[in-house]
Amino acid sequence: MDKNLLIMKLKEWSLTDLFKQFIRDSYSGKRMRKDGKKIKPQTIANYEAVLNLLLEFEEFKATPIVITSITSRNKRMLLSERKYWNRFFKEFTDFLFTKKHCHDNYVGLVIKIVRIFFNYLSSEKFLAVGDFYKKFYVYKEEVPIITLFPDQLKFLINNKEFEEGLTDALKRTKDIFVLGSTVGLRFSDLFSITFNNIERVGNSRYLCIKSIKTETVTRIKLPEYALDIIEKFSYKKEKRKTILPPISKNQFNKNLKVLAEKAGWTHFVDKKRSRRGKEMDVPKRSGTSSLRFCDLISSHVMRRTAVSTMLMLGMPEHAVKKISGHAENSKAFYRYVNLVQSYLDTYIDKVYEQLV
């Protein structure tokens, strides 16, 4: 019997079995995005991570998670189901916070995917699962932005003495980081660009690319130092399709931390995260609640540095959004605006200090 028909006939289902079907439908194209396009691989990878957490939770509780068909209006049954799913939410989030040591943002992502899954059961599989899942709270937190300031980026671009002291691997990491911090692309987009993405208009060259995540088209004029970096990587262009040589994100981040340490960016930064809305220090191995800047830098800093640098050096917000692909009312974008204001306030304070 077809699995989908079997699902329709049952009155109780294993949540994890249905979640596996949810992932299969996302892979195969049976389940599509609202715009009619296929679910992206990274999104499916997130679904698989949530499935693994649900399986771990079942093993931890030694009890399967069961979804019961709610076809009756019996108040006792409805109350029982409401209590069951309220308890599931509490125990599952407790598991994520205490056993898996997750913070609010990740727990929020997990719960958001669980809600998407239940909506799929209701709207696409037409299963009477109730609407209790709609009350699952999606946790959120404000995470401090880690970014380079313009003088730090300028150091990486221009300091030849520093570059000469680096290994070949760190030189490549530096060049990739500088390019990424100039064009503001996400890691996946940066490593997908080819020489076909470079367009010549008069004496200028532009990088034209369609974002893998947002599918927006970005066109960025390339400065000379960025063209020099691209030229460095052109020596093997016949042997590979992309401009940049492949490297795993994990290895790139490791190299980046070493590079930042060699640059002397070892000042301590207070690192705070939230669990259940309560702010907490993130301890370092030594026990201190501060981490060195070089320990926190990662591939995400490239895009953040590009956006914050453009704003700090005076580019209008609407122009930066055009390059970065942020939506008009993006909350994430205005976190950069607040960061830039803080940066400017520091310089204003220094000016005023000289007047008193």
Image (cartoon, rainbow, N blue to C red):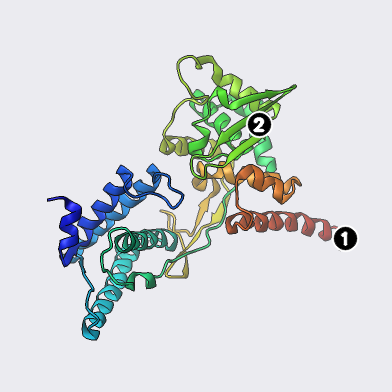
Q: Quadrant of the C terminus?
A: bottom right
Identify the image quadrant of residue 113: bottom left
Q: How many marks?
A: 2
Q: Is residue 52 visible?
A: no
Mark 2 vs 1, N-terminal side: 2
Q: Is mark 2 on a helix, strand or loop?
A: helix
Q: Is mark 1 on a helix, strand or loop?
A: loop
Q: Position of residue 185 (x, y in %)?
A: 56, 39
Identify the residue at horizontal 17%, vertical 52% (top origin): 3
Q: How far apart are marks 2 and 1 (CA)?
A: 34 Å
Identify the residue at horizontal 64%, vertical 25% (top origin): 199
Residue that mark 1 sits on: 355
Crowding around mark 1 (Cα neighbors within 10 Å: few <14, some 14 to 19, many 20+) is: few
Identify the image quadrant of residue 284: bottom left
Q: Is residue 176 above or below residue 353?
A: above
Res 241 label: none
Identify the residue at horizontal 51%, vertical 41% (top origin): 299
Kindly report which numbered mark, 2 or 1, lies closer to the viewer in this rendering: 2
Q: In this view, does 298 lie above or below 165?
A: below
Q: Which amino acid does label 1 sit on?
A: Leu
Q: Position of residue 4 (x, y in %)?
A: 20, 54
Q: Position of residue 344 (x, y in %)?
A: 74, 55
Q: Would residue 81 be found to the left or right of residue 170 on screen? A: left
Q: Would residue 237 be found to the left or right of residue 32 on screen? A: right
Crowding around mark 2 (Cα neighbors within 10 Å: few <14, some 14 to 19, many 20+) is: some
Residue that mark 2 sits on: 157
Which residue lies most toward the bottom here?
A: 75
Q: Looking at the image, which is closer to me, 334 or 117?
A: 117
Q: What residue type is labelled 2?
A: Ile
Q: Position of residue 275 (x, y in %)?
A: 42, 67
